[in-house]
Amino acid sequence: VATYMTSLRRRKVRVGETATSARAITEETLLELYKFNNIPEIAKVKQYSAGSLKAIKEPHEWGGARARRLLTLAYVLAFLCLLRFD
C-alpha cells in the first residue's frame, strides 16, 4: 500500500496536480465554513427519526448541524495548533 501511495503521488505531481498536503486550509476557508454553518436553515438541529438520514437529498445537509459544528471546531483547533508551530 505504501508503494502504491508513493507512486500515486509521483504520478499526480507529474500531471501537475497540487499535492494534497500543499492545499492548506486558510483563514478565509475557515471563515466561509463558519458562515455556511451559521445560515439559520442549515444551523437548525433537527429531530432524529429512524430512516431520516436516507431521505436527505440536499448535499448541504450531509452530517447534521451537530456534526458540522464538531468538524468546524476540529478544523479551527488544528489550524490554531499549526499556527503555533509555523
Image (cartoon, rainbow, N blue to C red):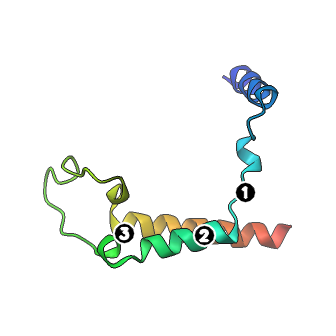
Q: Residues within 10 Å of mark 3 (few under 14, many from 20)?
A: some
Residue 70: give x, y in percent of width and height.
Answer: 46, 68
Disc nearer the start of the sequence (1/3): 1
Q: Which amino acid does label 2 sit on?
A: Leu
Position of residue 21 relative to residue 5, above or below, is: below
Position of residue 11 relative to residue 53, above or below, is: above
Position of residue 19 relative to residue 59, above or below, is: above
Label 2 or label 3, whichever lies nearer to me, is 2
Residue 5: give x, y in percent of width and height.
Answer: 70, 27
Q: Which of 46 and 33 is in front in this view?
A: 33
CB atoms at circles 1 and 3 under 8 Å apart? no
- Tell me the residue that label 2 is attached to: 30
Q: How crowded is mark 1: few (under 14 residues within 10 Å), some or many (20 or more)?
A: few
Q: Tell me the element at label 1.
A: loop
**Distance Cα–Cα, label 2 vs label 1:** 11 Å
Q: Which amino acid does label 1 sit on?
A: Ala
Q: Residue 66 has which mark?
A: 3
Q: Tell me the element at label 2.
A: helix
- Tell me the residue that label 1 is attached to: 24
**Distance Cα–Cα, label 1 vs label 3:** 25 Å
